[in-house]
Image: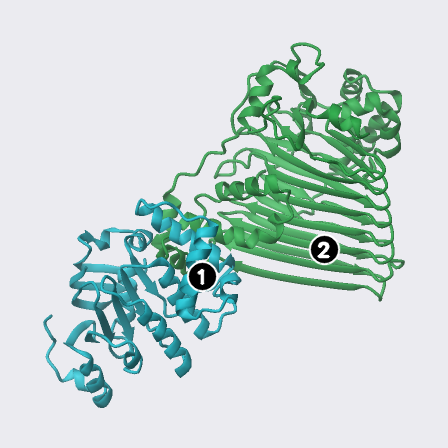
Chain colours: A green, B cyan
Amino acid sequence: MSTATDTIEEFANKEYKYGFVSDIDADTFAAGLSEDVVRRISAIKQEPEFLLEWRLKAYRHWLTMTEPTWPHVQYPPIDYQSTIYYSAPKPKKVLNSLDEVDPDLLATFEKLGISLAEQKRLSNVAVDAVFDSVSVATTFKAKLYDLGIIFCSFSEAVREHPDLIKQYLGSVVPYSDNYFATLNSAVFSDGSFCYIPKGVRCPMELSTYFRINAANTGQFERTLIIADEGSYVSYLEGCTAPMRDENQLHAAVVELIAMPGATIKYSTVQNWYPGDKNGVGGIYNFVTKRGKCAENAKISWTQVETGSAITWKYPSVILQGDNSIGEFYSVALTNNKQQADTGTKMIHLGKNTRSTIVSKGISAGNGQNTYRGLVKINSGAENARNYSQCDSLLLGDRCGAHTFPYIEVKNTSSQVEHEASTSKIGEDQIFYCKQRGLSAEDAVSMIVNGFCKEVFRELPMEFAVEAQKLLGVSLEGSVG
Amino acid sequence: MLTIKNLHATVQGKEILRGIDLQVKPGEVHAIMGPNGSGKSTLANVLAGRDAYEVTEGEVTFQGKDLLELEPEERAQEGIFLAFQYPVEIPGVNNTYFLKAALNSIRKYRGLPELDAMEFLKLVKEKMNVLHIDQSLLNRPVNEGFSGGEKKRNEIFQMAVLDPKLAILDETDSGLDIDALQTVAEGVNALRNSERGIIVVTHYQRLLNYIVPDFVHVLSNGRIVKSGTKELALELEAHGYGWIDSLEPATV
C-alpha cells in the first residue's frame, strides 16, 4: 500500500459511539434455555393460552433441529445454555404516559439521538423504543389510534388485540421455518406491532429503535406489520448496542402482510456493535424477515447494514398476488473483521409480478461481504419480471466480496436480468480528489456515497442523512 | 511565486529529476518540453505531491512556504492546480457536487465563507460561458464516459472554478485532435492574468502556437538543459530533441 494510505490508517479509529452501558435495574433470568424458561417468559407477559402453546411447539421443534452451517461466515459455536433469554428493565412505576418513563431510560435514548420527550421529538416520526427486548415507550400512539392505526409493542398487541396476533403470527414466517426463527418463536420477548386499516395512508413514519443493554442476553424481537387493503405505511428500524467482549445473539423475526393494494416500506439502519478491530465481541445479527403481497400490493425493503460482527439475513418478498411488486435495496458494509452473508429472496407466484434487487456491498479492512440472492419464478407466475444489480466495492487488499446469485425459473414468459460489478477505489482517484483540495477521508466518503446513491435514495429523508454519516464513521481508517 | 532549487526526485528507486532549478513569477507562462522519460510529468507530479515520487534533495518554495512539507490537499488549498494527463474517472460522484466540495474545502482553508448550492451554480454558469462548456458535463459523474477531449476540457473547467494561483498543465494536449486542442487552448488563455502562474508541460510545439509561453525550458535526463523564449520551441521543432544533447546544461 502506498504511503497515502498509510497516512489514512494512522487516523485513530473512531470509537463506536453507542458503546456505552446504561446502569438500569433489570429483571433478569438466569442463563439457560428450557421449557420452563419458555413458560416463565409467557407468564411474565401474561399471554393467552394459544400463544404459550405456539411457543412450546416452537421450542420442542427447535430441539429437533440442527444449526445451519451453509453461510459464508465463520464463528465459534454458540452455547445456547450460557445465554440469558429474558432481561427487562424494571419500571419504576406503572406507565400511563410517556412522562412516566424511567428518566434513566429516557436519557439513554436521548444519548442515542432518539428523543422521546414531548418537546423534542420529531413531529413526523412515531417511535417505539425497545430496550433489551422490552418496549419502553411508544410515541404518538393516541394520535395514530384516532386514525384507526394500531402502533404499539408486540406484547401490548397480544393483550389488546389477540385476534389479530392469532390470525397473522407465523403466517409469513411459520415457527418451523428455520433454526433461528424457531428459536425466536419460542423465546421472543417483544418487538413492534402495527396495523393500518383499509385505505388509510399512515401520516407519519413509524419507527422502532432497538437498544441492547444487558450483558450475555440474546435479543429475540418479533415484529408484525399488517397493512389492510389500499393502505400505506413507511416503517423504520434502528439498532445499536454497547461494546462488549462477548458476542451477543440477535435473532429477530419480522413479518409483513400487505393486503390487496397496500404498500409497506420497511427501512433498516443497522448499527449493532461490530466488534473491535481484532474481531473481539460484536453482535451476531441472524434475522428472518419476510413479507407477503396480495394482489396489487407492494413491499420494499431498504437496509443499511454497517454494524454487527456477523450479519446473516435475507429480507424477502413472497409475490403471491397478481401484479404485486417486491423491492430490495441494500448497502452492507464490512470493515475490520466483520462478516456479512446477506441478500434477498423474491418468490414470484402470481401473474405479472415484478421484483427489483439493488445490492451494494462495501468491503474494507479484513471484512468479508457475501451477497446471496434467490429469484424464484414458479410455473404459474406468468409474465414475471426481475431486475437484479449486485455491486461490490473493495477498499484495500485484505477484504473479500462474494456473490451467490440463485435464479430458478419455471415459467418461460418471464424476464430475469442480472448485472454485477466489482470495483475498488484506486489510489489514483484519491489523489485526484486530494489535488482538488479534498482530504482523503472526504474523498473516500464521497466515492462511497456515490456508490450507494441508488440505495440511499430509497430511505426516508430523515434517515438518509444519518445513513450517510454512519457510513462515513464506519469507514474511518479503512482506505486502501 | 514558485522557486525550485536543485530538485532531485526518484520513483521506484530510479532517479528521474537530477537537479531542477526554476522560477515562476505571477502572470508568467512557462513551457516545459522534452523527450519521453526526461522527467516532465515527474516534475508535475512532484509539485502536486504524489506519493509515489520521493524527493531526495532540493527545495521548493511556493508563496514563501516550503511546498514539500505540505500534503497534496494542502498544496491545492494553497492554490496549486494540476491538470492531469490522464484524468481518472470517479463513478457515482456528480461533477458539480465534486467541484463544489473541492471549492468549499479550499475556501474554508483560506478563511472564506463556503458557497451554498445556489451561489455555486451561479459561479459555474459564469465559467461555463467563458469556456464554452456544455451543460451536460455538469450532471455527469466525474469524467465517467467522457471522451478524451471532454476530459481535458473538464480539467480546464475545474481550473476555472477553483481559480488557482499556479496551474500546472500536464500534457494537456495529448490525445486531442486539432479542434479539441484549440478549444482547450482557448480555455487556458481565458484564464491567463497577471496574478496566475502557468506551467505547460508538453511534448509538441503545436500547443504553444495557441498558448504562447513567456519562457520555454527544455528538459533532458532530469535537468533543464536550455531555456529561452517561444522561439526556442520553434527551433526544437525544426531540429528535434537530439539537437539538445549537444548543448551545455543551462543555468537559470
Q: Secondary structure at mark 1?
A: helix
- A343 to the left or right of B75: right
Residue B122, visible in the rendered structure: yes
Q: Secondary structure at mark 2?
A: strand
Q: Is residue A161 above or below residue B13?
A: above
Amino acid marked by disc 2 = Thr
Estimate the spatial distance between the alpha carbons at disc 2 and disc 1, rounded to whole Å. 38 Å
- Quickly name the residue at label 1: B125
Left or right of residue A186, residue B126 in this image: left
The quarter of the displayed image where residue A180 is located: top right
> Quick check: A96 above or below A131?
above
Q: Residue at 53% x, 30% y: name it.
A: A18
Q: Which residue is mark 2?
A: A356
Name which residue lies at 83% across and 43% down. Answer: A230
Task: Give the class, few, some or many, for how many residues have Cα within 10 Å of label 1's Cα (few <14, many ≥20).
Answer: some
Q: Chain of mark 1?
A: B
Q: Residue furthest top?
A: A93
Q: Check contact, mark 2 vs mark 1: CB within 8 A.
A: no
Residue B163: where, in percent of width, then height?
A: 33, 59
Name the spot of residue B132 as percent of width and height, x first. Answer: 43, 71
* Residue A36, position as x, y percentages in the image: 78, 19
